[in-house]
Each structure stands twice: as structure tokens, then as C-alpha cells.
Image (tube, rainbow, N blue to C red):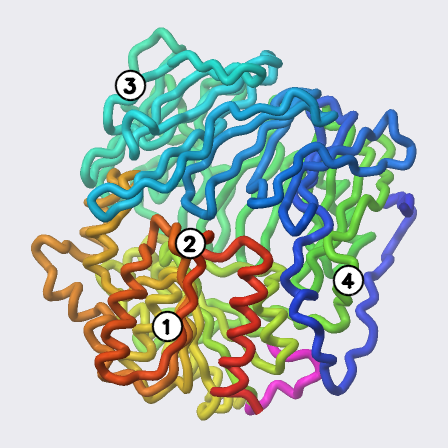
């Protein structure tokens, strides 16, 4: 392990070397095998470090004792061989909590284990797959608050009683015994606590009405802080201040009641119930998430996304450390991913779009750090591709932001192109190290991602421009991106494939059915093919957003003909290109019937297709063997249709 002083390191660049004129074809495992470490996290006292690491191709928990073990060897403390641990946290300085579901069914349970692997137990089991009335019944237990002043308990939410409206409990992390704190009234979709672990806030949804509720303490009555309808200019809470007098909120309103398209970060006075000062705003994007310090009990930083992740430190100490980090590790995103409670140590992950990066352990008192581990030491950044931010204009004048990735060593001209719309659709693509995109680039394909209208983070009007526009202007934004790539000379229009997952899978099928002349192939990964079916099989946990979906997508009760018009399953006869589809049998979001119904139509019209179904996967493939099968099949499919 190297020891680095960031105060004297200066500009030590991560050298990517010279690119070869032709890219070496790397084994598929290079891109998809599990990282050596993930989610590296310090214990509250900073004496231990936990992380996920692979054991028999499944993520398990490993712990490093930073004080007792001079070699800092990672010791495995769990033995999962049939599924990954999805995420974990420290329950106290000695005990860890982790969550898993069963084969992607999203019914997450909760487990606990001591740092030495002892006293492992199930606190809340992961439920088996249950289907009622064609919809998945998803049972979930999530940790709401790790009580910093109580080593034996955490606050959890559980939806066993009401699928969409969880109750709140205090749970013993050694026995699993839980005591009810708050019973849901049948409208509360989320809860939040104060910095002392007391249940102080809730968000209530009633049809299209949202209310933010607060109370002075756990004995007081709930009071409505704000009430608004879907589409109103309003604000939502981000965090509660340590003095409990102020909410930090992202708001599309100013204190004077004026409307703003891009959300800004404001204070909200809980005593007077009024918006206060503007803390931060960013041109062109919504703002922000906050970083608070348990040590100083202050707001110390703000994060937001432009074309890359951004951080603005309000604390001079951390601003100085960040500046030194960025000077020492230039051209990298240098993130604080974990700190001990006294802020004497931190985990830094240094990464960019060509490398998943390196974890460092930083001493915040001496401003020095040790390299702990590369996430994937088998990946050579010189062989990877840069994800480049781009923008173009839609046919009706909107600016569409996105990313272009070109094969390393190429001249960027007349390339086979994969058009890759994201899922959601109310999400966004961001700058990151993307395994699949690096795989495609290594195989010689350019990849175009676009944040079409409805993508989050670009303002209220951009989001609402997507309402009831599946397959229409949302799809036009994707089509216009392809036209831009052709006009720029990047894409060979005779070698274009469209590939996406979830809503991106819908966009893939919409592209093949509504603009069939544009694509030589399509890859539909767990995609919606029938919009009305999406409503019919909506999991019970989504019940609270059903009315909002009717407004933003379409109402299956009164607009069934409209939804059918924009459902690709009803237009299969127009398809001119081969299709590769992949679905998970345990998917509670886009059920397998979407694939089965589409397959019937493809057979009816004698259209070429391949269908992959994994019985042990849900909304996307997590298991390595299934990922290798999926991307290996995709490689052959792409080569046959748009390869050289």
C-alpha cells in the first residue's frame, strides 16, 4: 500500500498511456466480473472498515480491523453463495446490518452479523415471491435510522400490513424483536427522523395530493407543512437542521411566491412555516442534495449533477481537502464515500469514466492517505473509452443533453452505433464508469445516451414535457439524437441498433415499431411492451403513485385506446429488424407477460427474434453467470446485425 501526503504530492497524474491504433478485444469477464471491493465503509468509531467483495461470484461482507491488523487484511464474515448482499451499514461499532432479496423479487429482508462473523441472524426474512391478482406482492423491511446513541436498536420501516404504506418500528439488532412506533394512516409513503433518531416527519400521498407533515416530538400531533397537487410549484424536504428549527428544501418557489423552473436549495422555517434564504442554485439544472456533519452539527456541503457529479463545500476545512485531492489526483472524480463519526478518517473513491477507480483511507487530521484497493485492478484505463458529454436540439427546440462514447483508437467517423435510452423514464443518465458501455466500445461500437424530455434534474417544464408522451415527443428526442450522430458523421446510418432496459426497453420497441426504417436491430431488456398491462400488473407497493401515473402516462380506465395506440405490442407488423429480448421471471415491475405477449405477436407476423428468460432474476440481471450469458448473446447478436 502506498502512503500519500496530499499536501506535498502535487500534481501526480494517473497516466493512461498511449492508445493503440486498434483496440485489443478483451475477454467479456474483464467488464462484468465483480469488483474486488464495493461500498467500502468505516465503522462509526473509525477503527474498522467493511466492504462487499466477491466470494464464489457473490458479494459477501468483509471486514478490515484498521488498528489490530497491521497488514490490513480483509476477513470474510458471511457465506452467501446463491445471492449477493445488496447493501449494508454499520449498526454500531461491532455489528453490521445487510439486506438481500430472493432472486430479484425486491422483497428485501434484513440480516445482522458481528464484525468477526459471530452472532449472525435474520432480523426480518426476505419473502418468497407472491403474486395476487396478476401483481407481485413485495414485502420490504428497510432501515430508516441507525440510532447513534443506542447500540442495540435501529428504526425500521415495514410494509407487511399495508404494501404501499409502511409502518415504523424500533428493532433490536441482536434479537430481531421490534416494537411499533407509528402505525401508518394508509396515506404515508415515506418517513424521516431527526438527528436524535426521533420520528419527526412524513410525506403523505392522497390521489394527486402530496402533504409534508411534521411534529414537534413523538408525542405531538402531526401538522401539515405544505400541501400541493401534482404539477404545482412547490417544495420537498431534503434534510432537517441539527437545531430542529429549519428544513432544507428543494423548491420551485421563491420566498416571494414566484415560480422558478430549476429547483433551488432553500431554508424553511418550521416555526413560521415560511420559505427562507436561498442557499444554492445552479444554472441549467435542479439543485441540490446536502451534506451534514454529525461532528460539527452543521450543513457542510452540497451535491448536484451537471454533466458530471459536483460538490460545493460550505466548510473551509473540507473545501481545502477537496482542492488538495483534486490537485493530487487530477482528471478524476474524488468522492468522500464514508467518514467516521468524529471526522478523523474518511474513505475516498477516485474514479472517472475510464476506471472504476481506487479506494483510499484518508487521515483528516494529518491530510495523508493510504491506497486501500483498486476496485478492478485488471482494468487498464488506457484500453477504456471516455464518456463525453454532448448536447443537441430536438425538433421542437429543446436542448437534449447526453453522452457519447467512442471506441478507443477510432477516428470517431462512420461507426456502427448503439442508441441507448435510459430507464425510468423519470431518471437520468449520468457520467460514470459503465461496464456495458465499455464492453460495447471495446467491440468497436459507438454508444449514444440521451436524457430525453422527462429525464430528471433539468427543471420542472422539461420533466412535465414528458407527460402522456410515451412513444411520441419522448421518442422523437431519441430519434433526433440518432439524426444528430449521423449529421456529425459519427454514425453509419446503415449500422444502428437500439438497446435499452425497462423504459429504455419500451423505447427500444417504440423505435422498432414507430420508426422501423432507422434500426437494423433492437435489444429489449426487461422492457414495457404494453402500457395498459403495466397498470394491470403494477405491484401493490406502487399503489400510492397509481393516480399520478394516470396523469403522467395515461389513464387505462378512460384512455385505453390511447395507451394501446402507443404500446409496441400492438404494432409488431411494422417491425423490420431482428429483436433480442431478455427478461427475469421474478421481475415485479415489468412482469414476464410483457415478453410472452410480444412473443405471440412476433410469431404471428413471422418476425425474427430471440428471447432469454432467467428464472432467478428480476428487473435486470445481477448474477454474474446470467450477465455473462446476456452480454455474450448480445455480442453475437450485434455482430450479426451491425458488426463489421
SS assignment at label 3: strand
Drawn side of residue 207 relative to residue 297, left or right: left
Q: Which residue is mark 2?
A: 619
Residue furthest out toward the left = 558
SS assignment at label 4: loop
Residue at 60 percent of width and 51 percent of height: 310
Depth check: 188 or 638 in front?
638
How would you rate the neighbour count of disc 2 (Cα within 10 Å): few for under 14, some for 14-19, many for 20 or more? many
Q: Is residue 190 magenta?
A: no
Q: Which residue is mark 3?
A: 223
Spatial distance from mark 4 to mark 3, Cα to Cα? Answer: 55 Å
Which segment did they paint magenta? 406-414
SS assignment at label 2: loop
Spatial distance from mark 2 to mark 3, Cα to Cα? Answer: 38 Å
Which label was assigned to residue 495? none
Q: Are marks 4 and 3 in contact (CB under 8 Å)?
A: no
Amino acid at each position: 500500500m502506498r502512503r500519500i501526503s496530499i499536501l506535498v504530492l502535487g500534481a501526480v497524474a494517473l497516466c493512461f498511456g498511449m492508445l493503440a491504433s486498434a483496440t485489443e478485444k478483451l475477454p467479456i469477464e474483464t467488464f462484468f466480473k465483480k469488483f474486488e471491493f464495493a461500498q467500502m465503509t468505516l465503522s462509526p468509531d473509525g477503527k474498522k472498515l467493511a466492504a462487499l467483495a466477491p466470494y464464489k461470484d457473490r458479494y459477501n461482507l468483509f471486514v478490515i480491523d484498521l488498528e489490530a491488523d497491521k497488514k490490513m487484511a480483509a476477513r470474510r464474515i458471511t457465506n452467501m453463495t446463491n445471492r449477493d448482499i445488496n447493501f449494508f451499514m454499520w449498526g454500531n461499532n461491532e455489528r453490521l446490518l445487510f439486506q438481500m432479496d430472493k432472486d430479484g423479487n425486491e422483497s428485501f429482508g434484513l440480516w445482522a452479523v458481528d464484525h468477526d462473523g459471530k452472532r449472525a441472524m435474520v432480523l426480518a426474512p426476505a419473502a418468497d415471491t407472491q403474486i395476487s391478482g396478476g401483481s407481485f406482492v413485495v414485502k420490504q423491511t428497510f432501515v430508516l435510522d441507525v440510532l447513534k446513541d443506542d447500540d442495540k436498536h435501529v428504526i425500521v420501516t415495514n410494509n407487511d400490513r399495508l404494501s404501499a404504506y409502511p409502518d415504523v418500528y424500533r428493532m433490536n439488532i441482536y434479537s430481531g424483536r421490534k416494537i411499533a412506533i407509528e402505525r401508518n394512516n394508509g396515506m404515508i409513503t415515506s418517513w424521516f427522523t431527526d438527528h436524535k433518531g426521533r420520528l419527526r416527519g412524513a410525506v403523505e400521498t392522497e390521489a394527486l395530493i402530496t402533504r409534508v407533515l411534521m411534529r414537534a416530538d413523538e408525542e405531538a400531533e402531526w401538522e401539515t407543512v405544505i400541501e400541493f397537487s401534482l404539477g404545482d410549484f412547490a417544495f420537498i424536504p431534503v434534510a432537517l437542521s441539527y437545531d430542529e428549527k429549519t428544513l432544507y428544501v428543494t423548491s420551485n418557489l421563491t420566498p416571494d411566491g414566484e415560480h422558478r423552473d430549476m429547483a433551488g436549495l432553500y431554508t424553511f422555517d418550521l416555526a413560521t412555516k415560511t420559505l427562507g434564504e436561498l442557499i444554492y442554485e445552479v444554472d441549467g439544472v435542479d439543485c441540490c442534495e446536502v451534506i451534514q456533519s454529525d461532528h460539527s452539527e452543521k450543513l457542510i456541503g452540497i451535491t448536484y449533477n451537471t454533466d458530471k457529479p459536483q460538490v460545493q463545500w460550505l466548510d473551509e476545512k473540507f473545501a481545502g481537502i477537496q482542492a488538495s485531492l483534486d490537485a493530487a489526483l487530477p482528471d478524476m472524480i474524488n468522492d468522500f464515500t464514508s467518514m467516521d463519526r468524529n471526522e478523523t478518517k474518511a474513505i475516498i473513491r477516485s474514479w472517472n469514466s475510464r476506471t472504476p477507480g481506487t479506494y483510499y483511507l484518508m487521515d483528516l487530521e494529518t491530510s495523508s492517505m493510504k491506497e486501500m484497493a483498486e476496485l478492478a485492478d485488471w482494468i487498464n484505463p488506457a484500453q477504456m473509452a471516455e464518456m463525453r458529454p454532448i448536447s443537441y436540439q430536438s425538433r421542437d427546440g429543446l436542448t437534449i443533453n447526453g453522452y457519447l462514447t467512442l471506441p478507443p483508437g477510432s477516428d470517431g467517423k462512420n461507426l456502427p452505433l448503439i442508441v441507448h435510452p435510459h430507464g425510468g423514464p423519470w431518471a437520468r443518465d449520468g457520467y460514470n464508469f459503465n461496464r456495458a458501455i465499455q464492453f460495447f466500445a471495446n467491440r468497436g461500437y459507438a454508444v449514444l445516451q440521451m436524457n430525453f424530455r422527462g429525464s430528471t434534474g433539468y427543471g420542472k417544464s422539461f420533466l412535465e414535457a414528458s407527460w402522456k408522451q410515451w412513444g411520441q415527443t419522448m421518442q422523437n428526442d431519441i430519434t433526433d439524437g440518432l439524426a444528430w450522430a449521423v449529421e456529425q458523421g459519427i454514425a453509419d446510418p446503415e449500422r444502428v441498433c437500439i438497446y435499452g432496459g425497462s423504459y429504455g426497453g419500451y423505447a427500444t420497441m417504440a423505435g422498432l415499431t414507430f420508426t422501423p426504417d432507422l434500426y437494423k436491430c433492437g435489444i429489449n431488456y426487461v422492457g414495457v411492451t404494453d402500457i395498459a398491462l403495466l397498470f394491470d400488473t403494477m405491484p401493490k407497493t406502487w399503489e400510492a403513485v397509481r393516480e399520478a401515473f394516470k396523469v403522467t402516462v395515461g389513464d387505462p380506465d378512460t384512455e385505453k385506446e390511447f395507451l394501446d395506440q402507443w404500446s409496441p405490442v400492438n404494432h409488431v407488423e411494422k417491425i423490420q429488424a431482428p429483436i433480442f429480448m431478455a427478461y427475469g421471471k421474478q421481475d415485479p415491475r415489468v412482469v414476464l407477460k410483457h415478453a410472452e405477449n410480444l412473443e405471440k405477436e412476433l410469431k404471428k407476423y413471422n418476425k425474427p427474434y430471440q428471447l432469454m428468460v432467467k428464472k432467478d432474476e428480476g428487473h435486470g440481471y445481477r448474477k454474474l453467470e446470467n450477465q455473462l450469458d446476456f452480454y455474450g448473446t448480445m455480442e453475437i447478436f450485434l455482430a450479426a446485425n451491425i458488426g463489421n
